[in-house]
Image: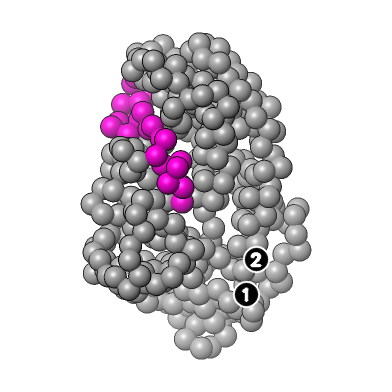
Amino acid sequence: MSKVVLGFSGGVDSAVSAKLLQKAGHQVYGLYLDNADRAAREDAVNAAEYIGIPLTVLDVKAELEEKVCRPFTACYLRGETPNPCIICNPGVKFKNLLEEAERIGAEHIATGHYARAEKGMIYKGMPANDQSYMLCRLTREQAGRCVFPLGPFEKKQVRAMAEEFGLPVAHKPDSMEICFIPDKNYIGWLSRRTELPPPGEFVFHGQVIDRHEGIHCYTVGQRRPGLYEGRKLYVSRIDPVSNTIELALWEELFKTQLLACDFNWINKEPSPGSMFPASVRVRHTKWENPRCTVMPEGNCVTIFCDEPVRAPAAGQSAVLYDGDRLLGGGFIV
């Protein structure tokens, strides 16, 4: 019987993961990463007790601040659109899972992500709720120790299993917000941490047409409220140096070439100067995953898409796949 350290939040995904791991014959040890939410912590403790797994509560507030919150703030001030979960997974969540596994002598680490792990490789989960995109920056050691019990299932199946297992959390709502911004008020959160950028100019085709409230209020692809000469306009570029936001028509948002740097390869790194086919996802959505040609150079990759992708945003991740296998990801620049 092998030991598994499971990232345990007390929600339906982690609770069902615990039951599935137990049914597969594993000894399950829960790890709750505490970010000072007392109610969430109590939910996790109660759920672990109900299921019958030991639970370690680890205070990660300082670590989350250093490795996630500060970079997240800096990205917004640079006019970028960060994804904090992609930063948190290798630097905080899976790092601590692996350290706990080493401490207790566990062979594997697990989470409730909707993805699959086989022989050190990570694959997409079911299309309806695939979360492999969020795992693109895992280290090879982390990926090699992973187990994802929910990989073969859709969310509705997981909720049905929670009912069958008699879990009290079967109908607990999904957590949709960023854990350190539970009220979803990004601007309020940023304003309590730093001085916000001042208002500036909206520019459309080289012409100033209006004022904006601050670059931190916008992201590439977002629609500007109202119409301009009867047309809808969208954010196409944010320039923190000039404090301007460039606007474009819908059809002008689509790009066939992008550059992603600080690229993390889950498994084998390609040879310098090589070119190879793949598919790419530029945000955590399900409807854009075009075929592409990848040209690595140093720690960056240039990606040539067969079909245009909508509004690739600086700071977001470009994530590459070979079929269903996750190759890795880098930050769009």
Residue 328 picture location, percent across and down: 38, 54
Residue 287 picture location, percent across and down: 30, 54
| Numbered badge on residue 45 | none
- Where 246 sits versus 315, above or below? below
Badge 1: how crowded within 10 Å, few (<14), some, or many (20+)?
some
Q: Residue at x 32, y 34 (%)?
A: 151
Which amino acid, by three-letter code, is at mark 1?
Pro
Distance (Cα) linking label 2 and label 1: 7 Å
Label pair 2/1, CB-CB below 8 angstroms: yes
Question: Secondary structure beneath disc 1?
Answer: loop
What span is in magenta?
Answer: 137-161
Whether residue 127 is visible: yes
Residue to which mark 1 is pinned: 240
- Where 41 sits versus 312, above or below? above
Asked if residue 47 lies in the magenta stretch, the reply is no
Asked if residue 151 lies in the magenta stretch, the reply is yes
Which amino acid, by three-letter code, is at mark 2?
Leu
Q: State the scheme by which the image is colored.
A: one colour
Residue to which mark 2 is pinned: 77
Q: Residue at x 71, y 71 (%)?
A: 198
Q: Residue at x 44, y 61 (%)?
A: 263
Comparing 79 with 84, the one in front is 84
